[in-house]
Image (cartoon, rainbow, N blue to C red):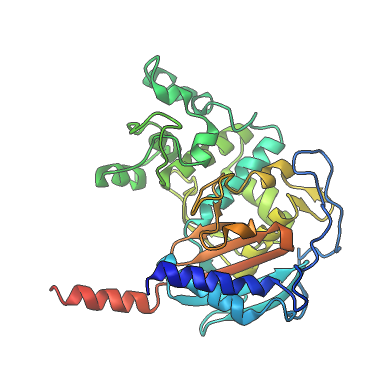
Amino acid sequence: MSTQIIAWILSFLSFFMVWNSSGQPNSIPETRVSPFGDELPPDKYKLWPTEEFALGSPRHCLSPKAFEAFYALKGIIDGGSKTEGLLVLHKGRLIYENYAEGWDKDTPHWVASVTKSVTATLVGIAIYEGHIGSIKDKVLDYFPEAEDLIPAGDSKRDMTIEHLLTMTSGLWMETQEEWDGFFAEDQTDSALYAFLLPQKAAPGETYYYDSAVSSILLGIVAQAAKRDLLEYAWDRLFTPLGISSVVWDTAADGLPFGGFGIEMTPRDMLRLGYLYLNYGRWDDRQIFDPVWAAQAGPRAMSTRAYGHSFWNNELLPFFGFYEADGMYGQFISIYPKWDLVVVRTGDRGQLEEIWDGVLGLFQ
């Protein structure tokens, strides 16, 4: 039986993890915000884990074993067979938390491309605060030093912030030489470097997933806010949410890598997911526009669609949830209809041993 068939069977079974014994869906909280309105979501549960999480117990319709099985499968699809942490937040309460040996709530975990969703969040904050006009802004407007380096009529002049968020900019690093330049110890402007790479396609013409373009986004935020990017991130995002564990790798010029490089605890990952579940509200503060959260996930429900640096779920598209996703199964899954956030961290586990063994047969 193929992995895909197994995935769909388990996905169908996992549907019952959010279904109660009466055969009716769990009660869905009344709409807390009009996704495209100005109304702020009410403080429905009055539970804000800025310091500590309120604890709760799993209900029979939210089976920890179902979550464990479902996210183990998602991890395998992402190349990681070992679950190192799994947390479930329901209606503002932490109802399940489990760690593999060697991990606990205070141990930061490498989150890989979940970093891209953090980067996108900072873009949303900068737009909400008026530093950036909108996602339709031209990228070139934030790199005036590139004006004379890009010929008139070049399609790169049409590249927008939205193209970067959706990985449709036409930029990607193909050669080792390009990556070496990006990581070079004498790199003085990693964002500008990535922006000036040869364009492989016109903006909006094709999708190509690439980590370097996310550094361009961070360069735009730093330029627009006129702040050190890390200082801005701590001041506007991490500290207000009570996130304290973040360590973020930087390029030689001091700008963090926009597409990877963050380590943080699973509980801090959960805080970020809860911020999106609440449409950008945290306690009595609006961190970003509710519309930003409503548009974060992909508009298409096709398998593995990519939105504003968030994915839809490849196994249960009918659930309508979206997630930050990093290799080897790092997930922050947001289920708006179910008032639920799930965090999973993982590693290659036995897959690495199996793969190494296969390679050994040919050596």
Residue at 71% of width from left, 60% of height from top?
274
As drawn, the residue found furthest toward the bottom would be: 101
Q: Nearer the viewer, residue 300 or 358?
A: 300
In the image shown, does 132 or 46 lie closer to the viewer? 46
Horizontally, is 148 left or right of 64 in the view?
left
Q: Above or below — where is 209 with respect to 164?
A: below
Image coordinates for residue 96, horizontal then vertical, percent: 68, 78
Q: Is 171 placed above or below 339 here? A: above
Residue 231 in percent (x, y) is at 62, 47
Q: 265 left or right of 190?
A: right
Single out the residue that lies furthest toward the top.
Answer: 152
Q: Identify which residue, 1 or 246, lies in the foreground.
A: 1
| Residue 226 appears in the picture as rendered | yes
Residue projecting furthest to the left: 363
Q: Is residue 97 above or below residue 232?
A: below
Q: Nearer the viewer, residue 301 or 179?
A: 301
Residue 50 relative to residue 10: left or right? right
Percent coordinates x, y for residue 288 in the rendering: 72, 44
* Quadrant location, the C terminus: bottom left
Q: Position of residue 44 (x, y in %)?
A: 86, 59
The answer to whether any part of residue 76 appears in the image is no
How many numbered discs, if any?
0
Splitting the image into 4 quarters, where does residue 15 fall?
A: bottom right
